[in-house]
Image: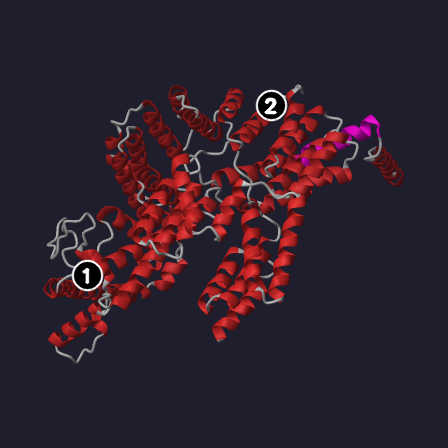
Amino acid sequence: MNKYFILYIACLFGVFILGCSQYSSSPLSVGFHNVNAKYNALFQAKIKFKEAESLIFDARQDNYSQLLPILLPIDSLSAQTVNEQLAAVIKKASLVAERHQNSKWLDDAYVMIGEARLLKEDYKNAIETFKFVNTSATSDDARDAALIGLMRAYTEQGEYQTALRVAEILRTEPLNKENTVGFYLTKAYLHQLKQEYKTSVAILEEALPLMPKNEEKARLFFVAGQLYELVNNPQLASQKYASVSKNRPSYNLDFYAKLNKSLALGQTDSFQKLLKDPKNKDLQDKIYEAMATAEIRKGNTQSGLRFLQSSARTNQNPQQLAFTYLRLADSYYNQMGDYEMASAYYDSTAISLPQQDPQYKRVIEKQRSLADFVIQTKIIRTEDSLQRLAKMNPAQLDKVLDKVYSDQQAKEESQKRATEIANKNKQLQNKNVANTFNDPNKPMWYFNNPIAMSQGKTAFIARWGNRVLEDNWRRSTKDNVLSFNSSNALSNQNISNTLSTNVGDLNANNSSNDVMKTAIASLKAKIPFSPEALLASRKRQEEATFALGKVYKLNLNEPKNATITFEKFLKNFPTSSHEAEVLYLLCLLNEDNAGVYAFYKNQLMSKYADSYFSRLLIRSQNESLSTGKESEVQKLYAEAYNYYVQNNFTNAMGIVEKGLKEYPNSQIEDKLVFLKAVLFAKTQDTKAYQTALENFISDYPKSQLISLAKERLAAVGAK
């Protein structure tokens, strides 16, 4: 009896299993696989996916002084932190495809696989998955979710037009509530990245009423406030900031919302109260930054910069500090025109700004351009100082050098004491090195922390200026040994920097009087007393002034300052070898001013009619030569070369000059110029020949004759 009963049960079970095949369309089979797909594999996949999203949201580092993105950008760092959860999502959702082919949840499983791949930055496979669902899904909701994922994938890759085409398809679809929110947020994010802020905030307004109260919604209200500020609607901005506190925000988010609301309404009286509140101790930098914004909006740029510097000093977040430095750098560059201070702050920004930040490339370009600017201006000031010192009478000069020597002694003594203190502190610090490295919460020692050192240096310069390390360095006024009536008067600090030497390197066995004499003699050695030394100093100043003009013109795009610098160059260095190029650049800088343009063009054509820059100017004013004209200049070149072979150098030179004058912008211009340089070897001295070759190499770096020109130049040098 028991045997028959067991056999009966086994047969029933077998029939049930056969009837529940994933390829069967029977109601029993479909129901079985629907239940298992939804409440087993898919349920677990959704839990893991929500866990991943929560971890990413909680680990975000929002910089509230910058425009927050509507959706958290997908990046490798966030993907790495949730790699385990996303792998589990793909594994669990894939079980639906492997074991429950006839389930109605199959499309949802594929959508979840695509979304997990999207968060892993696996855009290629994510897009393929979403496209597969779009073409094969039987569920409209799953197809809509796949299209939203596809739009997000294209947006993250910067393919905005493709993403908009997907959005046009979705716009006509009847979406459920979840997909409607996803569509609105993704489209608002797309327009935000395109800097279409009015469209972005309008779409975001549609999504907010559909979302539950939580920190994510509070954050989106904050973003809406920021967007309204960008489109100059402070009233709506303040309303959105006020809504943040009604949606369960974090303390920091609520604090920044209140701060921005006060700024939008111009209610800045509460800032001092916020500064004094102990709860805001860690947020003082943001209060100072808000105070700076308020002052700058009122037109008080200097006061605003002081508050920004206070923000930098109190900042405890290196990532946000980079943006404070950047704001200071941009303010000093754009509003104040103080390029040296701007250079210092761009240096500090480059240290701490993440390389993936969109502004990083611009910061590096500014940093390099301004570094060149600082180098050239320092050379100009230094040589100007040395030349002024050379003109002093001996009594005045000795008085200045005595002061410089005593200042440097005080400086070196202060540096020595500072080094001793630093070494002592380092020894004490080394006792706890192991503990410091084992405990990440312990702060790094100041002198081992490059960010802290850069921050301290910038803060010091911002408050006190670039002071020399010496006693009484905080005095606002110091005794000046010399005073010049000129506006370019030398300060003791500039003299000290110009003539710096290390007193400690002198022989310690000498008496103090001997050391002083030796040090002052070393200082005097830098001053260009002789005609040769003065000429060399003038040459360095000439090259630096020329380079500075090009920095203004080519790197900083400052046409006004470039023009002033080049005009000063022509006045101070009238016989410079760079005069032709300077005149050419002044023509370019004054293309909109016909009178000034004609003045510099006439000078260029009259003084340097045969120069490369004259031909370059003519070339820019003329179209390319016709085929017939090119043929004519080819014949002229052949004729000139034949005369050269026959040693008839005079006729050859005449034809070359005719070709250069009458056929500017020809395809064989470099050949004509090179032949002219070779003719100089036969008709003029070696110096003229050498200069012609050097100019050819400089003016035609892409010519096929460049290697031959270099060989000839090397041969001239060897002779």
The residues colored magenta run 25-42
Vertical placement of residue 411 versus 624, above or below: below
Quadrant of the rendering where the N terminus is positioned: top right
Where residue 493 sits, quadrant-wise, is bottom left
Q: Is residue 507 visible?
A: yes
Q: Position of residue 158 (x, y in %)?
A: 59, 37
What kind of residue is marked 1? Leu
Where residue 468 sits, quadrant-wise, is bottom left
Q: Residues within 10 Å of mark 2 (few under 14, many from 20)?
A: many
Residue 220 is labelled as none
In the depicted view, which residue is nearer to us: 326 or 33? Answer: 326
Vertical placement of residue 424 versus 596, above or below: below
Report whether 346 appears left or right of 359: left
Residue on which disc 2 sits? 180
Vertical placement of residue 485 versus 433, above or below: above
Q: Position of residue 142 (x, y in %)?
A: 69, 28
Residue on which disc 1 sits? 389
Vertical placement of residue 292 versus 659, above or below: above
Q: Name the main secondary structure of what is drawn in magenta.
A: helix
Residue depicted at x 53% and y 33%: 193
